[in-house]
Image (tube, helix red, strand yellow):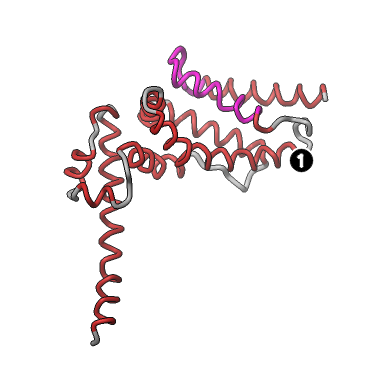
Amino acid sequence: MNSGAQTAQSRSAGRPRNEESRKRILASTLEMLRTEPLQAITIEGIARAAGVSKTTIYRWWESKASIVIDAFMEYHIVRTPMRRDLSPGEAIMDHMRHLAEQYSGWPGRVVAQILGEAQSDPSVGREFRERFHYGRRAIVREVLDEWRKSGDIDPATDVEMLMDAIYAPIYMRLIIGHAPLDDAFITEYQAFMNDLLQAKRKQG
């Protein structure tokens, strides 16, 4: 076998190990997020828990915030789906129900800590927006636009404003903590949003 073929084979063999390390880093970070406050988590601690070097971590991520957000996303996205087998309105309400359920537990605590840390470190807020918020917002915007075009809500609805209004009650309860994100809230929230949007359509 010539040296070029040996090099190609070596690189090919190395890729699965690299991906395995990456997955182990994310899994270790996620496990730490379940039990430890964000401020207590360090790159050194993640490396130790994952059994890798700090150099390996910095190969994929430039900061603790970027690892934490990616680990959170891998867990969170599949548990707050935007279903395509439902009507736009049903899909939005199903998504928000799953979001409230998730944020009522430790994932909500993680998001609250990320947003809190972002107030004193703008780079954390930027990482959260770029790695998580903008992508999720684009998906929700697409479904809300379909809902608007369907005629089931007022066709003149400002989708950007509606998106903020839909998310606001959940984030308000998450950040302020004045009331729980429980089953009663989810039921009342869905009924209220449906009534509000139907009323707006009738006025239009």
Q: Main secondary structure of the magenta part?
A: helix
Is residue 57 depicted above or below 163 in this figure?
below
Q: Which residue is mark 1?
A: 150
Is residue 52 depicted above or below 154 in this figure?
below
Q: Residue furthest bottom?
A: 1
Where does the N terminus fall, quadrant-wise?
A: bottom left
Q: Position of residue 131 (x, y in %)?
A: 45, 41
Q: Quadrant of residue 30?
A: top left
Where does the C terminus fall, quadrant-wise?
A: top right
Of residue 177 and residue 182, the one placed in the foreground of this image is: 177
Residue at 47 percent of width and 22 percent of height = 182
Residue at 56 percent of width and 38 percent of height = 137
Q: Quadrant of residue 19?
A: bottom left
Residue at 79 percent of width and 36 percent of height = 151
Apparent side of residue 19 relative to residue 98 in the rendered image (left or right): left
Q: Residue furthest top?
A: 178
Apparent side of residue 29 relative to residue 122 in the rendered image (left or right): left
Is residue 134 depicted above or below 121 in this figure?
below
Q: Is residue 37 magenta?
A: no
Residue at 53 percent of width and 20 percent of height = 185
Crowdedness near tag 1: few (<14), some (14–19) or many (≥20) residues, C-alpha within 10 Å: some
Q: Position of residue 186 (x, y in %)?
A: 54, 24
Q: Quadrant of residue 95?
A: top right
| Highlighted magenta segment, given as a residue range | 161-184
Q: Position of residue 145 (x, y in %)?
A: 69, 39
Of residue 65 and residue 106, the one placed in the foreground of this image is: 65
Of residue 126 and residue 41, the one placed in the foreground of this image is: 126
Apparent side of residue 94 relative to residue 176 in the rendered image (left or right): right
Disc 1 marks a residue whose amino acid type is: Ser
Q: Position of residue 108 (x, y in %)?
A: 40, 28
Of residue 197 and residue 110, the one placed in the foreground of this image is: 110
Q: Secondary structure at mark 1?
A: helix
